[in-house]
Image (cartoon, grey):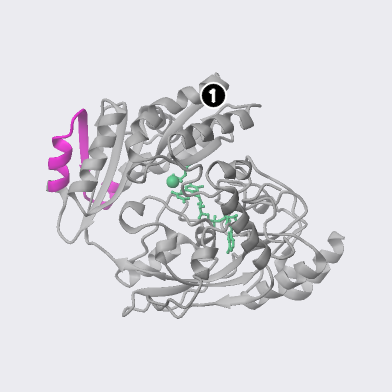
Amino acid sequence: MSGAIVEQLVAIVGPANVLTTDLDRYEVDWTRRYTGRAACVVRPADTAEVATVVSWARRAGVALVPQGGNTGLVGGSVPRGGEVVVSLERLRHIGPVDALSRQVTVGAGVTIHDLHETARAAGLRYAVDFGARGSATVGGSVATNAGGINVVRYGMTRQQIVGVEAVLGTGDVVSHLQGLVKDNTGFDLASLLCGSEGTLGIVTAVRVRLVTEQPARVTALAGFDRVEAAVETMASLCRSLDTVDAAELMLDSGVDLVESAVGVSSPIPRAAAYLLVECSAHDDQSESLGAILGAAPGLSDVAIAVTPSQRDALWRLRDEHTPSINTLGPPLKFDVTVPIDRLAGFVSSIGRVVSDVAPKARTFVFGHAADGNMHVNVSGVVDRDVDVTDAVLRAVVAEGGSISAEHGIGVTKARWLHLNRSAAEIGAMRAIKTALDPDGIMNPGVLFAD
Ligand code: FAD
Ligand code: 2HG
Ligand code: ZN
């Protein structure tokens, strides 16, 4: 069967673009927790080839796993066993930046970093940013509706999309890339595909809006004697300043691990909790930011950075959390939102929820405080994955939260989807899936637990 698959795909994309050996980077996920064997990896060159591959898969009854940069954290980008991985890595075209509309159309395989560089060269900025920017692709970020560090100011990926081109699970191509900001002509397919995690179709190109680059940027790292004080200060900053791009929370345990794992050190003395805040505007925000932080309750110390290298040093403390945690072995990852008024309590208590089930586990909590989005990473859980997951996700829901803030449901959370979605909602989602992917070939096992 596999020989026939390869032969038929070679006829579509050519022998150089059907891979059958050395597939680790396509078969193993970023955390090394998820892996499965692919029938092969196919690398189409353009939308037409993607459409031919999908139509072929329907006829052949072969399941497909779309893949961008393989930085997804919920197991949805790697095969479960026997699927064909469709890598979008060759769809790297970057259209001209339209300075009038402040938009650009890019191929699904363009990295977030390259999109940033393209925007920067035109004096603009792409508003979504996160640590995996060097490998994560625009297609993958649309498929997951990625969030990241600037959501507090600019919203998630869905808010940046003006149009999408995609091949549906039917094999049909839908292309709506005109870039009209106001366009109420029926269902918003771009919004629907955004966050669909490869279960409805394959995104091949995206038209995104760009925002004005604010020339004066300041970053501050503030230490607090307790989590509540950090959260209160975050809320007060966001209330007082409309220039806050990012407000991230870190705890002593995470900073300690980053310092020992990668040797980045904090410029301020150790504290129970840290806020990393970035503001940008036309004029320098250091004074306003410094004044609010200086008067904050529970503040132990603060460092203000204005040069790019000083700012980068502060951001490394935050960005290195995920790689540092990986050095302890494949973690169990939770990416959750709770209402802001529950945030401090949640952060302080979730470690106990984990240790009640897995006493030897180490729990790290950090994330996008302004969005109520915390990343709970658990290391050292050997055989209690399901029990720990169940306990953490139920604790989140008990606080009125979401079991997936920005990474998606993937395979990891599929069996807990009902905690956040009613039977009617899941039924509607399944009906959409059946309409756009009638043979169920698009990323089976992701989002819906079958
Ligand atoms: P992949 O991992 O390849 O795929 C992710 C999902 O999208 C899979 O289900 C896949 O099947 C599907 N998919 C991929 N490409 C397509 C396509 N063209 N069409 C249809 N479906 C497709 N995420 C955040 O939201 N915020 C963060 O702050 C953040 N920080 C991260 C930091 C690190 C260090 C790492 C490793 C990951 C981080 N992530 C974050 C998660 C991840 O980077 C994002 O989910 C990203 O959007 C995935 O892009 P990708 O190209 O790597 O997609
Ligand atoms: C981040 O915000 C990412 O750094 C990854 O979303 C979070 O590693 C994680 O759990
Ligand atoms: Zn995140």
Q: Is residue 129 magenta?
A: no
Say which residue appears at 77% left-offset and 71% top-offset.
56
Front position in the image: 289 or 168: 168
Front position in the image: 339 or 159: 339
> In the displayed structure, does residue 226 sit left or right of residue 426?
left
Say which residue appears at 52% left-offset and 56% top-offset.
144
> In the displayed structure, does residue 239 sit left or right of residue 208?
left
Residue 291 locus on image (x, y percent): 12, 41
Which of the 4 image quadrants contains residue 50?
bottom right
Q: Which residue is mark 1?
A: 361
Residue 420 locus on image (x, y percent): 52, 44
- Does residue 427 show up? yes
Which of the 4 image quadrants contains residue 116?
bottom left
Say which residue appears at 21% left-offset and 35% top-offset.
302
- Does residue 267 show up? no
Q: Amino acid at mark 1?
A: Ala
Q: Which residues are magenta?
A: 288-311
In the image, residue 394 sits, relative to residue 186, either above or below, namely above
Residue 351 locus on image (x, y percent): 46, 25
In the image, residue 22 sits, relative to residue 101, either above or below, namely above
Residue 387 locus on image (x, y percent): 61, 28
In the image, residue 236 sits, relative to residue 64, either above or below, namely above
Secondary structure beneath label 1: loop
Q: Is residue 304 magenta?
A: yes
> In the displayed structure, does residue 200 sit left or right of residue 251?
right
In the image, residue 221 sits, relative to residue 200, either above or below, namely above
